[in-house]
Image (spheres, rainbow, N blue to C red):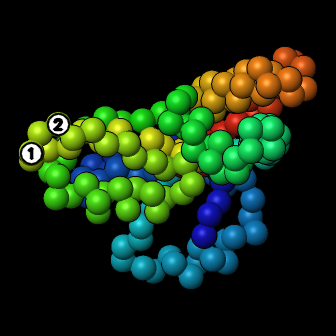
Amino acid sequence: MNVQGKIIKFEPDFELHKPKITLELTRQDNLGDFSKLKDELVLDIEIKKHREKRSNRANSYCWELLTKISEIIGNSKEDVYRDFISHKGIYRQFEIDNSAVDTFKHLWSQRGLGWLCDTLESDENKTTIFAYYGTSSYNTKQMADFIDYVVQEAKQLGIPTETPDEIAKMKAMWIPSI
C-alpha cells in the first residue's frame, strides 16, 4: 500500500527505548488496509519525500527530436539516443577484473536502452569501464542538460525546435523516476 502524508510528531519512547513517529495521511480511504496490518509484529516501512511523476512532455519532446534527427542522418532513433548518451550522458568510470567485463556489460545493459558501457583495457588483469546511465535515472539538471544537447544537435541539422521558454517549462517539470 502506498499513501501520502506528513510527519506530525517524532518522539522517543523512554520506556521502550524506541522512537515513535506520528503520521497524518492525506486521505482516509486506505484505513481498512491499515487495520489488517495492525497486529503484525514487524512491518517494512518506507518513508520518503514525495515527488510528482516525471514530465512525459519533456521525455516525449526529447524522443520527437531524436526521431527527426535519426530520419535526417539515416540511423535508428535508438542508435541516435545511444550515441548522444555516450557523448553527453552521465557515466561512472571504474576498473574491474578482465574476467568480469562481459558479465558486467551484459547486466548493466539489461537496465534499459541508454545503459551503455565503453571499455578501455588498462592492463592484462584490469579493464577501465565507462558505465553510462540511461536518462530514466537522471535528475532534473542532468535531463535538462541532455535535452539542451539534443536541441542543439537538432538545430545544427536545421530541425525546428520549440521556443526556449517552452523548452524551459518542459525541463523544469522533469522529475527523476528513481
Q: Is residue 33 left or right of residue 173?
A: left
The residue lying toward the viewer, choosing from 102 and 7, is 102
State left or right for residue 27 relative to residue 106: right
Task: Write the residue at 46% across / 48% down.
Answer: 116
Residue at 60 percent of width and 70 percent of height = 1
Q: Residues within 10 Å of mark 2 (few under 14, many from 20)?
A: some
Q: Position of residue 16 (x, y in %)?
A: 26, 58
Task: Tell me the residue at 62%/63% (across/down).
Answer: 2
Q: Regarding mark 2 in the picture, which secondary structure is present there? A: loop
Residue at x-position 14% and y-position 44%: 126
- Disc 1 marks a residue whose amino acid type is Glu
Which of the 4 quarters of the picture holds residue 81? top right
Which amino acid, mark 2? Ser
Tell me: 17 left or right of 111.
Answer: left
Q: Residue reaching furthest left?
A: 125
Picture quadrant of residue 122? top left
> Where 57 falls versus 89 (above or below)?
below
Q: Is residue 99 above or below residue 64?
A: below
How many numbered discs, if any?
Answer: 2
Left or right: residue 56 versus residue 176 is: right
Q: Is residue 50 visible?
A: no
- Disc 2/disc 1 C-alpha distance (Å): 7 Å
Residue 103 quadrant:
bottom left
How would you rate the neighbour count of disc 1 (Cα within 10 Å): few for under 14, some for 14-19, many for 20 or more? few
User: Disc 2 designates what residue?
Assistant: 122
Q: Position of residue 63 (x, y in %)?
A: 76, 44
Measuring from the top left, give residue 138's x and y in whole percent. 56, 38
Q: Residue furthest top?
A: 164
Above or below: residue 38 compared with residue 147: below
Task: Write down the residue under mark 1.
Answer: 124
Residue 39 % position (x, y): 45, 80
- Label 1's element? loop
